[in-house]
Amino acid sequence: MSEPQFACINGELIPKEKAFVPLYDHGMLYGDGLFEGIRVYNNRVFKLDEHVARLYFSAKALNIELAIDKTAMIADIVKTAKANGHVNGYIRVTVTRGEGLGLDPKHLKGKANVYISCEQLALYPKEMYENGLIVVTVSTRLPSPDVIDPRVKCTGKYINNIMAKAEANRYGAGEGLMLTREGYVGEATGDNIFLIKNGAITTPPASIGILQGITRDTVIDLARGFGIAVSEPIITQYDVYNADEVFLTGTAAEVIPAVHFDGRDIGDGKPGPITRKLIAAYRDLTQSTGTPVA
Ligand code: PXG
């Protein structure tokens, strides 16, 4: 992109090439931070209130004190999107506990740091949305909810997801399916999973140890709006292999069919009709709703 690009650090817009993280930022030292990935579609920020709400719930859970309230955060996010002039884009909000050496939060200077940037991001090529993804179950397990509550979207936890993604890459798969410690189906490395069987939808319950995705909630609403039953039972690999259709959801991946798991075709190995219907409905919604940027 030829136009100047900006990041927003603690409310101040800075040319992107001059935007740096302090050496002793707790996020840098210990992964002591939170993040949100948010999309801009058609000059509107999609599900902005929901992302900011999740960020503040995560901050509360980790006792990270922000200097600004949700209204000011929303204004800074919109300001950053606007400054970068992306009609469609991907906003990253990162909050860290602050600056200071040593684990003890009482050594931190000042309040949490807030970093906001905006990029272009296409996670998968267009063909994958038409033909579907190949997925493998990875050996990297989800952290147990008694260690870190999965609803907390904290940066440090993601080393596990990165290792899982690298494992999927080694198999040449588009995504890795992560299981809970007990071996139940959890989620992909950056996406939630949905199964369709006999016209009804299932997805693992958030309490099993997964992120309660905003795209997940959106797709559940869309499906119910179509009169499709959605439930959240415990799901096993057997259920995945024997589903009629499977798809993944996430802000970055959006809604994407998954047609092949661990060497088995799902159904006939092609994206199914309900998946296609939900992809179309999700696209319509992203184009027509959201917080205006301009
Ligand atoms: N599970 C996990 C583990 C995630 O990290 C989702 C599900 C989907 O949640 P949303 O709210 O996006 O529907 C996520 C989301 C990134 C990146 O920077 C990570 C996510 C989303 C977007 C980008 O790689 N995680």
Image (cartoon, helix red, strand yellow):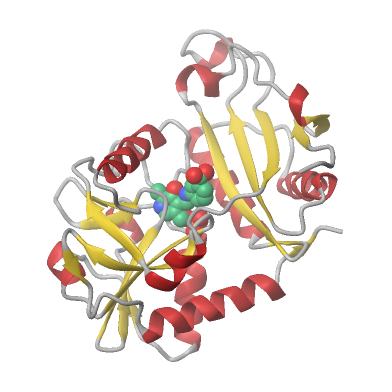
Quadrant occupied by the N terminus: top right
* Corner quadrant of residue 67: top right
Q: Residue furthest right?
A: 294
109 lies above or below 164:
above
- Apparent side of residue 81 relative to residue 294 in the rendered image (left or right): left
Inspect this view and state whether residue 151 appears: no
Q: Position of residue 92 (x, y in %)?
A: 62, 43
Image point 35% across, 82% down: which residue? 272
Q: From the viewer's perspective, is 24 left or right of 136?
A: right
The count of marks equals: 0
202 shown above or below 50: below
Determine whether, in the image, residue 258 is placed left or right of residue 55.
left
Q: Residue at x 41, y 56 (%)?
A: 191
Q: Nearer the viewer, residue 120 or 83?
A: 120
Residue 131 location, x and y as percent?
38, 71
Relative horizontal placement of residue 256, taking residue 82 as reference (left or right): left
Vertical position of residue 154 compared to residue 50: above or below: above
Asked if one can make out residue 186 in the rendered structure from this viewpoint, the answer is: yes
What residue is rendered at 81% in x and 58% in y? 293
Nearer to the camera, 84 or 214: 84
Looking at the figure, which quarter contains the C terminus? bottom right
Q: Report x, y in % for residue 113.
A: 67, 27
| Residue at image location 45% in from the left, 75% down from the top | 220
Residue sitting farthest toward the bottom = 227
Residue 59 lies, with reference to residue 266, above or below; the image says above
Q: Position of residue 48 (x, y in %)?
A: 67, 57
Q: Quadrant of residue 212?
A: bottom left
Q: Nearer the viewer, residue 247 or 233?
A: 247
Quarter occupied by residue 289 = bottom right
